[in-house]
Amino acid sequence: MSLIITWYGQSAFGLEADGKRILIDPFLSGNPILETDPDTVNPDTILLTHAHNDHVGDTVAIAKRTGATVIATFELANFIGSQGVENVIGGNHGGTVPFDGGTAKFTPAWHTSSYNHNGTVVAPGIPAGFVVRFGGKTLYFSGDTALFMDMQLIADEELDVAVIPIGDLFTMGPKDAVKAAKFLRAGTVIPCHYNTFPAIEQDAEAFKADVEEQTASRALVLKPGESAEL
């Protein structure tokens, strides 16, 4: 079974395998490095790591149009449901949610979580990451996070792929992300959450070189809009 991953910029990813499609943190319209029409994606499942606007993105519109199931931490799931999305599942750290084609296990993340809704800042819940089993692979989407020691426990999930931020300022930067790669022991490491805005500009190729020099993982640097088979 082949698994295709697509990076839409920032932390927005698509997964496709066996006719099933997943979107993670679909910040598509208004994304400075890749403006994607949300009407062109047709997921069965949407995973949200936390409530920041550059992660929730176009979730509500996409889910209403496609009927996709949205999986998020409990409070964020309740908020998404309050916007008229019918298929919403809330969970929390340590819990596993089955979806059509796979499972998503919530993991901790060190970050914040708030959403600007019609000019009012609301804070539905806490940030998370996901260990996703899909398409015959185990993938870790860390969400926005600092480096933390318990990534060594996440490595026990036997990861094929780890998707981690390198932008610094709001998340861990490249040096800490290399340490994260050491902790996670994934076959492939994919950087995200960089170059979207000037404040988080980074050299992904330098990060790739450091990962491959200092760890047993390979690093896969995707261009915005690029897909790869895993």
Image (spheres, grey):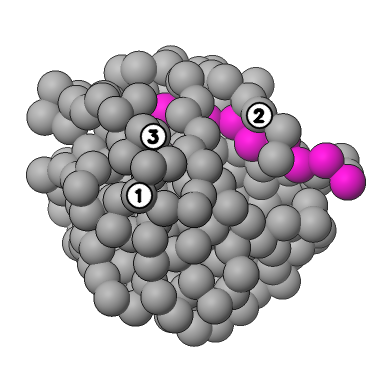
Write down the quadrant of residue 181 in the picture.
bottom left
State the residue position of label 3.
208
State if disc 2 and disc 1 touch (CB < 8 Å): no
Distance between mark 3 and mark 2 Cα atoms = 16 Å
Residue 43 horizontal/vertical position (percent)? 69, 41
Q: Residue at x 24, y 63 (%)?
A: 147
Whether residue 11 sits left or right of residue 36 in the image: it is left
State if disc 2 and disc 3 touch (CB < 8 Å): no
Sequence-first tag of 3 and 2: 3
Q: Residue at x 47, y 20 (%)?
A: 223
Residue at far bottom of view: 94
Q: Residue at x 46, y 29 (%)?
A: 221
Q: Which amino acid does label 3 sit on?
A: Lys
Q: What residue type is labelled 2?
A: Ala
Q: What residue type is labelled 1?
A: Gln
In what element is the residue under mark 3?
helix
Image vertical order of residue 181 relative to residue 166, above or below: below
State the residue position of label 1.
214
In the image, the segment drawn in magenta is: 1-11
Is residue 136 visible in the rendered structure shown here? yes
Sequence-first tag of 1 and 3: 3
State the residue position of label 2.
228
Seen from the viewer's position, the closer of residues 159 and 109 is 159
In what element is the residue under mark 2?
strand
Predominant SS of the magenta segment: loop
Distance between mark 1 and mark 2 Cα atoms = 24 Å
Image vertical order of residue 13 relative to residue 120, above or below: above
